[in-house]
Amino acid sequence: MPARRPRGPAAPAPPPATGSVLEVGDLSVEYILDRGTITAVEHVSFDLDPGEFIGIVGESGCGKSTLLFAIAQLLAPPAEITGGSVIFKGRSMVGLTDKQLAAVRWRDLSVVMQSAMNALNPVKSIGAQFKDAMRAHGVSSKQEIAGRSAEVLKMVGIDPVHLKSYPHQLSGGMRQRSMIAMAMLFTPDLVIMDEPTSALDVVAQRSLMVQIKELQREFGFAVIFVTHDMSLVSHFSDRLMVMYAGQVAELGATRQVFDSPLHPYSAGLLDAFPSIRGPKVHLSGIPGSPPDLARPPHGCRFAPRCPKVMARCEAAPPDLYQVGGTQVRCYLHEGASGGDAGSWASGSGGPGSQDAGNEDARSAL
Ligand code: ADP
């Protein structure tokens, strides 16, 4: 049974029982700078079902955070949504006033940032910050605030005595857990997480991921989880979106993308990170770095780094092709729409070496 969800006077309607909790349609975001315009997110579309966990992966600078910020309407100039839509629970998020957004945040949609130290107010205790969030949504009963604050802190494995603690008195892992607890105050429908584990050591990282997954299973919220570590998130996500240079390179079921990546970039990412468990494998990485988005390559954006590059890749950019249930932006799969094009990497010994890692995924919880 989901925990009781405190509801203030201005409670929005619950999400529809069926249909997507989030629909991102053809979304584009630009940074408008003196030296030119950078398109950090370009024509990105995806839906998220209630309770679904999607991992968004890619190297630094590929537009992952910009996409999250655009979804949560947290962008500030010089960033601007220049096209597309973000429909959350059937309602457009683009163009909502600050007041309308404030009514949605925490209650229906929570954001957990990379650094809890920056996101938490350093001069307020954890309990005071929880209280502010609840009061902002019309919960005024001291008893209810104290009860719910203790409850969410316990849910993330922290003794409620730490409601009195200030952020600097907690470890990095505890601060991140506190942020997740705060995100749970109203049991939202969607939790957006931007590299929440990146500052933690591997053991704390894994334990936090397991905790997030358990909370998600228990309370049924959907998750968008951004990370550069494809191997880590693949153990927990239902679907993976691989972003490269502001675009979707591949989008599909985690098992499919992880076991049989279609895009050479996805395959390269898998080779770049070790499995949490499983045998030691050689990590090859991807030579070079993502392009400057002020001057992206004329053809496929990955062409300059791609081990499978063909002449046409440099001539014109590929579309997103549908291959079975996966979308992939690569000429290798043009014409395979609806069919089973097989994997670029199958039998390559590359991402296949991650099979042991995916066994972890199945047994992780
Ligand atoms: P990621 O989260 O994948 O690391 P970001 O969304 O942070 O990527 O950045 C995507 C691109 O947007 C960067 O390569 C950079 O060119 C541009 N960008 C990000 N933040 C800013 C900013 N504040 N001003 C100008 N350009 C920015």
Image (tube, helix red, strand yellow):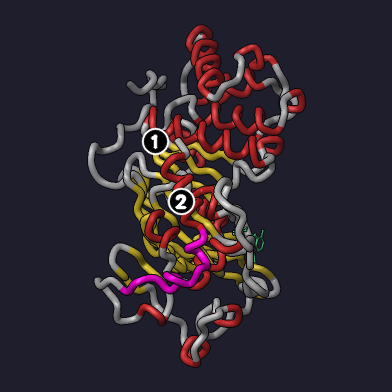
**SS under mark 1:** loop
**SS under mark 2:** helix
Task: State left or right for residue 359 relative to residue 117.
Answer: left
Looking at the picture, how far across and down is residue 55, in whole percent? 47, 51
Q: Nearer the viewer, residue 185 or 284?
A: 284
User: Does residue 139 belong to the magenta stretch?
Assistant: no
CA gap, disc 2 and disc 1: 24 Å
- Quadrant hosting residue 128: top right
Q: Residue at x 56, y 61 (%)?
A: 58
Q: Nearer the viewer, residue 295 or 158?
A: 158
The extreme front residue here reads 279
Read off the residue under disc 1: 221
Magenta stretch, overall SS: loop
Looking at the picture, how far across and down is residue 13, in whole percent? 30, 32
Q: Quadrant of ligand 1?
A: bottom right
Identify the magenta region.
Answer: 341-353
Read off the residue under disc 2: 358
Q: Residue at x 72, y 28 (%)?
A: 171
Looking at the picture, how far across and down is residue 52, in whole percent? 37, 44
Mark 2 and mark 1 lie on one chain; the one further toward the N terminus is 1
* Vertical placement of residue 217 versus 199, above or below: above
Q: Would residue 181 be visible to someone looking at this image?
A: yes
* Vertical placement of residue 66 versus 314, above or below: above
Badge 1 density bin: few <14, some 14–19, many ≥20, Cα 10 Å = many
* Vertical placement of residue 164 versus 325, above or below: above
Q: Amino acid at mark 1?
A: Phe
Image depth: mark 2 or mark 1 in front: 2
Q: Residue at x 58, y 46 (%)?
A: 276
Badge 2 density bin: few <14, some 14–19, many ≥20, Cα 10 Å = many
- Quadrant hosting residue 332: bottom left
Looking at the picture, how far across and down is residue 364, in whole percent? 47, 39
User: Does residue 343 belong to the magenta stretch?
Assistant: yes
